[in-house]
Amino acid sequence: MAGDMASRFNALIRKANTAKTVMEDDPDVGGLLVLLGEKIKTKKAYETVLGEPEDAEKWCKAQGLSDKQERILMAMQAQKDIFVPNVPLDHALTAFFLFQVALVGWGMHVRGLLWFFVLLLVIIDSLIRRVKGLSEELGKRLSSELLRLRAVDSSPLSGKVQMKKWTEQSWQLFIHVVASIAELVILTEETWWDDPSTCWVPHPFEQRGKARADLQVLYMAQLAVWMYTCFIHRFVDERRKDYFVMYLHHVVTISLVGVSWGNGYLRVGLLVLYVHDVSDIFVDLLKMSNYLKVEGAKGWFITEIAYASCVCSWMYYRLYQFPFRAIYASFVEPLKLLTKHPRQSVTVLGLEWLPPDLPLYTEMNALLFLLLMLHIYWFHLFLMIGYRIINEGAREASRQEYEGDSDEEGAPGDGQQQQERPLKAIAAHATKEKGRA
C-alpha cells in the first residue's frame, strides 16, 4: 500500500510539473513528498487529504506547510481530478447552446425586445453578484455562531473552496425562491393549475403578445437565467460526475422555455417552471446545510431534515405533479380538444394525433419526457444519499453522491474537475504569495 501511495504522489507531482506549478529537484517538493509518505499510508488517509479542495486546504494549515508547499499540494489535489470530457459530445452540446443563444437573440430582435433581454441579463448578473456578496457575510456569521453554539467542531465555511460553494448555492436559492413566489402568485390568480385545459383556451396564437405583462417578463427572466446558468456551467464552474447530465438538462430547458415563449405556450409553460423552481428550493437547502456541516444530534439533525424534505418534495413535484399535471396539460389536453374538433387533427395509425396548429407539439413533449427521465435519474442519486447517510453520515453522503464527487482516483466516470481548476488554484496561490513578498 505504501508503494502504491508513493507512486500516486509521484504521478501527481509530474502532473503538477506539466502545469508549470513546481520545478524538478525542488527541495520543497522533496520535503512535501516525505511528509505525505509519513502521514498518508492508507486509501482512507489519502482521501482525507486529497479527496476535496477544502480537505487539502485544511490539511495544509494543520501541518503548517509553507506557501509554496501549500500551492503544490493544492495543485496536486486539483490534478487528481482533472476532467477529461467526451470531447465530441462536449463540442456538440456547446455548439447547440451557442445556436440557442443566436436563435433567442434573433427572436428577441425580431420582436424589438433584444435591448430589454440584454438589460435582464445585466440585472440578473448584478443581482447574483450582490447576493453572493451578502451570502458570504451571512456565511461567516453563521459559521461563527454555529461554532459558538458547538453545533460544529470547526468553522464550516472558513476555507475558500467551501465558501465559494456556499455563495454559488446561495444565489441559486435566491433565484428559485423569487421565481417560485412570482409563479405562485400568477397561478393563484388563474385557472391553469386547477384546470389544465384552460392552458389551451383560447388558442395560444390568439394569446401571443397579449398575455399578462408579468407573465411575459417572468418568462423572459427565466430564459435569461437559464442561459446565464448554462454559460456558467460550461465555461466557469468545476466539472463533476454529472457534468453532461446537467449540461443536457440546461440546453433542454432553454429549448423548452425559448420555444414555448416564441409560440405563446406561456400558460402551460408556467406549470413546468413552477414544479421545477419550487422543488429546487429544497435541493438548494440540502446542499447549503451540507456545507454548514450541521448533522446529527449535535447539529440538530438539520442536514437529515433537509434531506428528507428534499426527497419528499422531489417525489411530489418532479415525479407526481410534473408528469401528471404539467406533462398531462401539455401532452393530453390538446388531444382532448382535438376530439371535440376533429377537423383540426390528422389521423396517424387510426388515432387523431399531432395538432397541425400547435408548432413543435411533438418535439416539445418529447423534451418534457426527456426531463422526466432525468428527474428519475436524480431521484436515484437521492436514494443513494439515503443509503450513504445510514452508512457514512449525512454530510459525507451528500458530498459523495449529489455533488458528484468520486470515491476513487481514475475510476471511469469520476466527478473530475475541469482543466481550468488547477490554473485557478495556482493563480490564487501565486497572487497570495506575491502579495506577501
Image (cartoon, grey):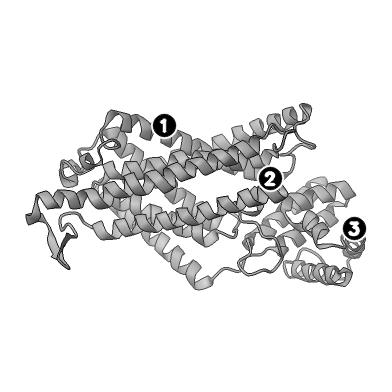
The foreground one among 85 and 382 is 382
Disc 1 is placed on an element classified as helix
Say which label, 1 or 3, has the lower sequence index.
3
The foreground one among 280 and 16 is 280
Q: Using the image, determine if residue 193 lies above or below residue 83.
A: above
Q: Is residue 300 left or right of residue 220?
A: right
Q: Using the image, determine if residue 1 lies above or below residue 262.
A: below
Disc 3 is placed on an element classified as helix
The tag on residue 181 is 1
Q: Tell me if residue 71 can be seen.
A: no
Residue at the spot 18% in from the left edge and 49% down from the top edge: 336
Q: Position of residue 131 (x, y in %)?
A: 55, 35
Calculate the distance from the C-alpha at mark 1 to the C-alpha at mark 2.
Answer: 29 Å
Q: Using the image, determine if residue 285 lies above or below residue 90.
A: above
Residue position for label 3: 39
Say which label, 1 or 2, has the lower sequence index.
1
Q: Is residue 185 left or right of residue 200?
A: right
* Mark 3 crowdedness (10 Å alpha carbons): few <14, some 14-19, many ≥20: few
Q: Tell me if residue 38 can be seen.
A: yes
Q: Position of residue 125 (x, y in %)?
A: 49, 42
* Mark 2 crowdedness (10 Å alpha carbons): few <14, some 14-19, many ≥20: many
Q: Amino acid at mark 1?
A: Ile
Residue position for label 2: 395
